[in-house]
Amino acid sequence: MIRFDSDYMAGAHPEVLDALVRTNLELTVGYGNDPYTAEARRLICRAIENANAEIMFLVGGTQTNATVIDGVLARHEGVLAAESGHIAVHESGAIEASGHKVLTLPHHEGKVVAGDVEHFITEFYSDETHQHMVAPGMLYISQPTEYGTLYSLEELKSLSEVCHKHDIPLYIDGARLGYALCAPNADFKLADLARLADIFYIGGTKVGTLFGEAVVVNNRSLLKNLFPLVKQHGALLAKGRLLGVQFATLFRDGLYERIGSHGVRLAMRLREIFGKAGYEPIIASTTNQQFFRLPNTLIDDLRREATFDYWGPRGDKESIVRFVTSWSTTDEDVDRLEALLGAQ
Amino acid sequence: MIRFDSDYMAGAHPEVLDALVRTNLELTVGYGNDPYTAEARRLICRAIENANAEIMFLVGGTQTNATVIDGVLARHEGVLAAESGHIAVHESGAIEASGHKVLTLPHHEGKVVAGDVEHFITEFYSDETHQHMVAPGMLYISQPTEYGTLYSLEELKSLSEVCHKHDIPLYIDGARLGYALCAPNADFKLADLARLADIFYIGGTKVGTLFGEAVVVNNRSLLKNLFPLVKQHGALLAKGRLLGVQFATLFRDGLYERIGSHGVRLAMRLREIFGKAGYEPIIASTTNQQFFRLPNTLIDDLRREATFDYWGPRGDKESIVRFVTSWSTTDEDVDRLEALLGAQ
Amino acid sequence: MIRFDSDYMAGAHPEVLDALVRTNLELTVGYGNDPYTAEARRLICRAIENANAEIMFLVGGTQTNATVIDGVLARHEGVLAAESGHIAVHESGAIEASGHKVLTLPHHEGKVVAGDVEHFITEFYSDETHQHMVAPGMLYISQPTEYGTLYSLEELKSLSEVCHKHDIPLYIDGARLGYALCAPNADFKLADLARLADIFYIGGTKVGTLFGEAVVVNNRSLLKNLFPLVKQHGALLAKGRLLGVQFATLFRDGLYERIGSHGVRLAMRLREIFGKAGYEPIIASTTNQQFFRLPNTLIDDLRREATFDYWGPRGDKESIVRFVTSWSTTDEDVDRLEALLGAQ
Amino acid sequence: MIRFDSDYMAGAHPEVLDALVRTNLELTVGYGNDPYTAEARRLICRAIENANAEIMFLVGGTQTNATVIDGVLARHEGVLAAESGHIAVHESGAIEASGHKVLTLPHHEGKVVAGDVEHFITEFYSDETHQHMVAPGMLYISQPTEYGTLYSLEELKSLSEVCHKHDIPLYIDGARLGYALCAPNADFKLADLARLADIFYIGGTKVGTLFGEAVVVNNRSLLKNLFPLVKQHGALLAKGRLLGVQFATLFRDGLYERIGSHGVRLAMRLREIFGKAGYEPIIASTTNQQFFRLPNTLIDDLRREATFDYWGPRGDKESIVRFVTSWSTTDEDVDRLEALLGAQ
């Protein structure tokens, strides 16, 4: 069986796992006050070209979003997000559980546009009853989006501008950031995110680690007491050095980019072989998630030897499916999928 | 340097790490729906002799406590706990952050007594203004306690009885449960906890895993929607099988008990050597945490070659310190400490 | 100046105020344990034809919605509501502040339809990822709606059926219920609400009292500890009898209906005079709120002698405005408005 | 029956009620944007001698405390309070419901002392694990306290100093402030509170109004978005002018002081007559609440013609009781009580 369901099906990239094995019996203090975590912080600061950023390591994406958003927003504020955004759909109400409304914007293949943000904010403050409504207190976007699409540098600049014009911070969810950085059409670097976003996070779980997300706080005045906040959100790992060891490995010798490139290259191959078989992707994703509309008969056939995500029916005879690659996908996996498609 | 600061200084027990390495490249579905997690559930149900318990794996202790307590309590209820309890002191307000007051009881070397619980509840309901106060909705205890002490089976029975007499659930925090089960004076088994407690958790982080706590819900009517609740609390691990693999290893061949026994045996040696040097433990702990009152001069001397926790001064010349053992502590570590003490 | 901005511009209906004056110097116990509150409970139980309902009096609408919804929902659940619903728009995030997401449904002149509720729930549970999403835990509707429109008895039955088929409670916000009961097309009675809704509230603030809303809990198993919950939400009035005195007055001799009829009759006159002037209402409201699309020049003229709500521009030359009547609106007010319109 | 149970048993002071009656049929805009509320703000600013204070009117004490504390604290912070403080005991967990722990200090007849605050804060920050604990983010005191006792100006200065030395705000709950200002030993004025406290509230419910508390924000940087916060807490009154009318009446011609003086004078008479009968008050209260330890037989006798609060038994034969006066207590009430006591 070849598996394309998601990018969190394997354990850690072998180099990351080796680092954990190598350091396993060392004794260090807990909660991220160890030398490995310090090294990982330094390496990330170098990679993002911002020596003054605060870096904090958390375990998973939902807890990271909930912690950051709760820490940044005032009580009466909500967070703007695409209606397709992870926080708006797939976090079981974690944002609301900490007291904040998710204010949704229309999405365009998962992306929000600066004009819609501008429109929302100006409409909000021109409404005479706005004091009875939830004020927009920050903007959340995902890079890449939940649909695998990318914001261009120009789009990021526009979003950053509209946010800062209205004095709200820009926060970027980078759960799959490695695959965005290495996309064929990527025209931005980590340093751009550090410059344009007030806070963002560099995803590990889907890009080579067992688990872990690195929060980068560029605008430190926004999140002054991150440590107790992380603890309060149940997001502080006792053996914090496990996060340090893993992220230091990702950022010591360019492993993060190697993983991203590998995943994206195989995703592009996947587009190609589906294209050859007559199925163009339905979303302009240039990262490791690819979406197709396939005949149900084909889906049934493929399922005998492959797994992938089912997103729902389109009419009686076709459905939308998602194929995901990662560092653990191999060329052989894609070859086999190609053979399966060719055999139809 | 020999290190006795805490029981979360090393990575995982080698057998646990081996299991992670062995399964690393396998591809499984996420969020705990994999075969390893299923196996771990079965093994734990067997160990606790309750085939009907619901078992859920979370990452850390604070998030486990916050999730369980938030899920069990009604909005107007609080949780009873010793004033020394972890949830009352060291969780950065995670319980309050989900809306609930921690109602504190006096502690006796970290333990609460059934009489105090009874007294609190009857006083509460006899107060004419109790509808304006936070109602006691469950009892939280730690086994072993934050001071390393143990509840006897008799004490557990009394607490279970008083709770059920007043129709509130009993919840046991077992962050260090392995060291309790193997204490010289332990007269209870896992099956007793399954019988007496409505919910408890079996700690992994401090007893052999990289991270992870296994929540055991014996009274399933109390926590009907654990999965979305765990997700909402940011406590759902994407690669859930990492928890399954680790806990299956702990419970497949008695590793959990072996780890507990090892840690406790070295803690007992540690008591002995301090006793020989003239320093009796100040708390009757029979588990892996030992507390001593030492002259500051001795503390300074020991610190040149050993690390341990400083708990605060007692007068001008002495202080309280804590020494902790774990699966990773060796006889050689204790020998060296003995030599250091002997050299004084 | 004649004023049609809202239905909370005057104090209390004179009969209500008289009752407050008459009882002012009496001394009674607090928090609603007084005889007036008991009488008001009895009168409401009689009016709704449900002797077993629990009746609780709160001060305002937002706090009532937040308290009821927070008390009914489990932690992982959200509340379904029209996207135009008061809780979705104009409560400053009070629902989210207590931890719950508002799950929005399309609205049809402020109303939700049973088919959309059915569709939401079945789609939700057919989604394989629904455990990561906020579960629909109750349905909130307003009668009349924020647009002044009414649910017919048939529509209420359909909504009640779809809710109970899926085992979620139906909750009705009756902030302006008095004006709904007396609408020309009203085919339902209070007793129908008591039969069809699990919980609803009878608004006082906009229907004759200084303040106050009467929550009716028909399905008492849903809200078992209302008193401490109300207290916790800061919604418990110390001098609770003020609510009892006012609601007893409203329900002793049919005052609630008289107020409703008066407000609706004047609203119908208002529709008529606008119609004569060539402006048909843009929403099929049969209650005390009426919406028109007027030329901006007319709006400017009217404003010299009348006040009303501005809802926003429609193109360059017209705008939407709202006119509201209440028990305090007089025929003379409407006559004067007619004269103003006739003078154009 | 003469009634001394509490100070919220009657309606409003006749002058306050007259003002409500007089203005009842006027039409004004809602939510506190009316001229009466503006006037009340001006009058209070004058009374406290701080023209720059922000004044906001809420309905009740619990909601006021919850709103202010939630608005001031960061997510990881808690509020320091006497263990006898209203927020610590009698608000059904309203503070915790908004996510914050109440950090308790020892009380001395209801008062906290600056030394204990200093000690708590310095101990907290000297604890190496304080990042895992709830940080003290503000100090809450009541003036007068729940036991009727008063802070002297000197004590208030010390508390203000220790708070500001450690950069946490001082917040004063003035639910019964009128009775404090007029106590025989009162050596402070409203202007002193405005100078020493960052925020305080002037209670109306117990001092002459039907309901209502006036929050005074002296340090406006601490609570920047009070309006939406009040709305979110369900504490915004639609007919906001009712609060304005009442507080303007209290502060226009010294009514607030007259009410306070009256209540205190009768409380002092009450002390005297109990003293004559051989029962000295058990607490040094100089305000409108008086506490006595009485034989149960006397309590039973008194209860035939008087009501008062029972606080609990002391041994088999005696109990603690509370007698409360207010603006509505008359000299005749006290005469009758004297007669009752004399008849024993």
Image: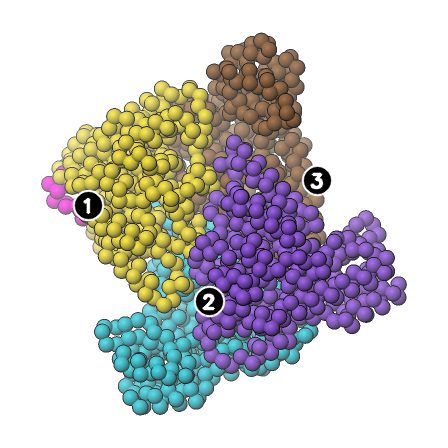
Chain colours: A yellow, B brown, C cyan, D purple
Category of crowding for the residue at label 1, using alpha-carbon neighbours closer than 10 angstroms: few (below 14), some (14–19), many (at least 20): some
- For disc 2, the marked residue is C172
Q: Secondary structure at mark 3?
A: helix
Letter of the chain that mark 3 sits on in the rendering:
B
Name the quadrant containing residue A4: top left
Letter of the chain that mark 1 sits on in the rendering:
A
Q: Secondary structure at mark 2?
A: strand
Residue shown at the point (53%, 36%) measured from the top left: D125
Residue A201 image offset from top left, x and y in percent? 32, 39
Residue C265 image offset from top left, x and y in percent? 43, 85
Q: Which residues are magenta?
A: A273-286
Q: CA distance from mark 3 to mark 1?
A: 66 Å
- Tell me: residue B194, above or below residue A134: above
Judge from the rendering whether residue B339 lies leftward or rightward of residue B252; answer left or right: right
- For disc 3, the marked residue is B115
Letter of the chain that mark 2 sits on in the rendering:
C
Residue D184 image offset from top left, x and y in percent? 72, 60
Category of crowding for the residue at label 2, using alpha-carbon neighbours closer than 10 angstroms: few (below 14), some (14–19), many (at least 20): many
